[in-house]
Amino acid sequence: MSETEPQVTVSTESPAEYEHLHRKRKETVGTVELAEVVDVWVGESELVCRFQFDWATDPIQRRYDLNSDRDIAKVERLCEANGLQFEQVSHLQGSLVELEYTGSQWLPRPEAAYTDGEGSAVETFRAECRLLVAELAQSPAFVRRGIERVRELSTTQLIIGIILVKKVAIIALLAHLLL
């Protein structure tokens, strides 16, 4: 064989190796892929969803703690993205969900705001506000009335209120430093 002739190599790649290489190509930060919800299991204190990609043999499993407000909010957003109520979570089976690779795991896009280190700052802020409101809704009546009044404020009134609170905080800080 001369040096100018091309050499042909035969690939003995098995299907498992092919899937592994294909998976590695897909698993780059920010990749978004559609996955089917193949199983939803609701237990006493836990909910388990399994997502299946058409290009992978092993499903992605996500566990949600039903005693955690944050996990319940994640499931609510996942249901809302598919036009369902939280109580209809078992009907997610068979629906398609966008999963995003975060560098270490595949994460449903609707729940990104509720996951530490994921989602935009605005999404995370809104998610934290929703969780705070849910916590405060279980608080004493005077706190709930205060929250209802704040929610009824117009945007202009809210901005003026924030400015006033900041000024009072600055005055209190200066008084503390000077006295």
Image: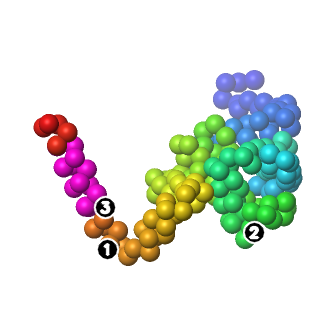
Q: Amino acid at mark 2?
A: Leu
Q: Which residues are magenta?
A: 163-174
Q: Which residue is mark 1?
A: 156
| Outermost left residue | 178
Q: Which residue is mark 2?
A: 84
Does 156 appear above or below 25?
below
Query: Which quadrant of the figure has residue 153?
Result: bottom left
Q: Amino acid at mark 3?
A: Ile
Q: Secondary structure at mark 1?
A: helix
**Tag shown at residue 162:** 3
Residue name at image x 30 percent, y 65 percent: 161
The question of residue 22 being in magenta is answered with no
**Majority SS type along the magenta span:** helix
Query: Which quadrant of the figure has residue 13?
Result: top right
Dots 1, 3 in contact, CB < 8 A: no
Q: In the visual, does 121 lie left or right of 67?
A: left
Image spot of residue 4 (x, y percent): 66, 29
Dots 2, 1 in contact, CB < 8 A: no
Name the front one of labels 2 and 1. Answer: 1
Image spot of residue 158 (x, y percent): 35, 68
Residue name at image x 59 percent, y 50 percent: 114
Q: Secondary structure at mark 2?
A: loop
How crowded is the residue under tag 1: few (<14 C-alpha within 10 Å), some, or many (20+)? few
Image spot of residue 42 (x, y percent): 85, 51
How crowded is the residue under tag 2: few (<14 C-alpha within 10 Å), some, or many (20+)? some
**Tag shown at residue 61:** none
The mark nearer the N terminus, 2 or 3, is 2
